[in-house]
Amino acid sequence: MPANRGPHPRDAKQFGPAQRNRLRAAVRDLSWLRSRGYTGAAAQKLVGNRHRLKRRQRNAVARSACTDVERAHRLQAQVAPGDVAGQPVQIDAFNALIAVEAALGGAFLFVGRDTAYRDVAPLKGTYRIAHQTAPAIRHLADTLRALSPERVAWYLDRSVSNAGRVQERLADAQPRAGPAWTVSVSGHVDDALRTAPGLVVTSDSELLDATDAWLHLEALVHARHTPDAHVVDLRPDGERSAGPPFPASTMLPAVP
């Protein structure tokens, strides 16, 4: 039976409007510590204790924080939708797919300092086909078609369960009039994404730091297909006015 990529029962309370100033302050404090070399679990614990955060709140803060240098690089490397046409796009497939599934299922996604969308439960080797998988693939395919890239390459981690089943679904979803795409299952996805030409789609921090051009595909799908998704902006005060997430689906043309 398919899984459901829905919210945790406590998320509405832990990430509701009353909590967000505290969470943003925690992202600010943890980023300040990381910018000064305090990158281990001790810094996360210090910030979590200071702001009296629950476990899932701590995870969201840890995944949304980054150093000032990392933020500057990631924002500079982000490619606008209008600049995608004619370029190859390389996709961290599970990363992008799970984010869109979460948006469709009502789970919470968080906008970090670098504007990337992340959840509180990163993939750890186990993936199950969900009720949201098929529509998520359709929305990704539609958005990619609207962007008109030269070609699209999807990379699935061989070590993750059901990679073969997802490969089949992605291969079947290629738009008839859209860009050519390939779907590969590999034991070296990160290496492939680091060296492949073109734009990278991922929210993995190490990959974002290693690339000079990344596309925020999840934000575009959000604007185009899931505007009511629970996307919580955890950027600290003074940073939320800068850069994407993109506010309107009108940035992409409609595709029949």
Image (cartoon, helix red, strand yellow):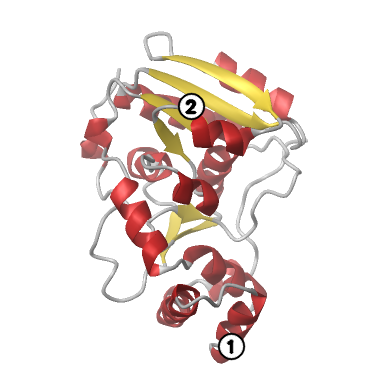
Residue at x 60%, y 58% (from the top left corner)? 7
Instruction: Identify the secondary structure beneath mark 1.
Output: loop
Label 1, residues with CA under 10 Å away: few <14, some 14-19, many ≥20:
some
Residue at x 48%, y 16% (from the top left corner)? 181
Residue 208 position in % (x across, y down): 46, 48
**Disc 2 to disc 1, C-alpha distance:** 40 Å
Q: Quadrant of the N terminus?
A: top right
Tell whether 16 sits left or right of 72.
right
**Residue 231: quarter of image:** bottom left
Which label sits on residue 138? Answer: 2
Instruction: Identify the secondary structure beneath mark 2.
Output: helix
**Residue 39: quarter of image:** bottom right
**Residue 85: quarter of image:** top left
Residue at x 61%, y 52% (from the top left corner)? 6
Q: Quadrant of the C terminus?
A: top left
Tell whether 239 sits left or right of 98.
left
Can see residue 92? no
Residue 173 position in % (x across, y down): 53, 18
Residue type at the position of mark 1: Arg
Rendered position, 49 above or below 221: below
Rendered position, 170 above or below 78: above
Residue 59 position in % (x across, y down): 60, 68
Q: Which mark sits nearer the N-terminus, 2 or 1?
A: 1
Residue under label 1, please give it. Answer: 52
Rendered position, 182 above or below 127: above
Work out whether residue 62 or residue 206 is closer to the camera in this orientation and state it. 206
